[in-house]
Image: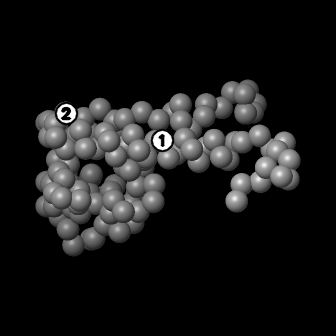
């Protein structure tokens, strides 16, 4: 089957928030102020985090600080949470959902901009 624009799902239709609970063998996702941490991660989780995300210190073992200021971090981290569902409190989960909703909305705007109709006249150029 050949791929074309008609049979490739859009980026926004592939977005879904990872399902997390208050218990997990992989570790715990915690928010303190504006910073996010993973507490007591399993060694395989730590290794994968360091492979996928730049900016994670090799010195951190028991508590890992997430580089959540990087562009696109939250969408990638949501993917990571689907592989390794971390435990999270209800309050932090609510805050994470708000962040992900904003990130998905921004990704949708970018997708719409990139897929916009190329037939616009020169007078309708965005400034």
How many numbered dots are placed on residues in this image?
A: 2
Q: Position of residue 95 (x, y in %)?
A: 25, 44
The coloring applied to the image is one colour
Above or below, comparing residue 59 to residue 94 in the picture:
below
Under circle 2, the secondary element is loop
Q: Position of residue 23 (x, y in %)?
A: 13, 36
Above or below, comparing residue 117 to residue 68 in the picture:
above
Quarter occupied by residue 22:
top left
Question: Residue visible at 23% across and 59% down?
Answer: 34
Which corner quadrant holds the C terminus? bottom right
Question: Residue visible at 22% across and 40% down?
Answer: 93
Name the mark on residue 105: 1
Above or below, comparing residue 61 to residue 81 in the picture:
below
Mark 1 is surrounded, within 10 Å at the Cα level, by few (under 14), some (14 to 19) or many (20 or more) other residues, namely few
How many angstroms separate mark 2 from mark 1 (CA)?
24 Å
Under circle 1, the secondary element is helix
Q: Position of residue 73 (x, y in %)?
A: 40, 55
| Foreground disc of the pair 2, 1 | 1
Quarter occupied by residue 35:
bottom left
What residue is disc 2 on? 21
């Amino acid at each position: 089957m050949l791929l074309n624009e008609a049979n490739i799902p859009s980026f926004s239709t592939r977005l879904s928030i990872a399902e997390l609970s208050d218990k997990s063998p992989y570790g715990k996702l915690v928010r303190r102020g504006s910073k996010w941490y993973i507490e007591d991660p399993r060694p395989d989780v730590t290794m994968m985090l360091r492979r996928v995300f730049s900016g994670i210190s090799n010195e951190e073992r028991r508590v890992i600080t997430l580089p959540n200021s990087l562009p696109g971090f939250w969408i990638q981290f949501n993917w990571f949470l689907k592989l390794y569902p971390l435990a999270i409190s209800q309050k932090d989960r609510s805050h994470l959902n708000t962040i992900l909703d904003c990130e998905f909305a921004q990704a949708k705007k970018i997708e719409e901009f990139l897929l916009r109709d190329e037939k616009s006249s020169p007078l309708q150029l965005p400034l």
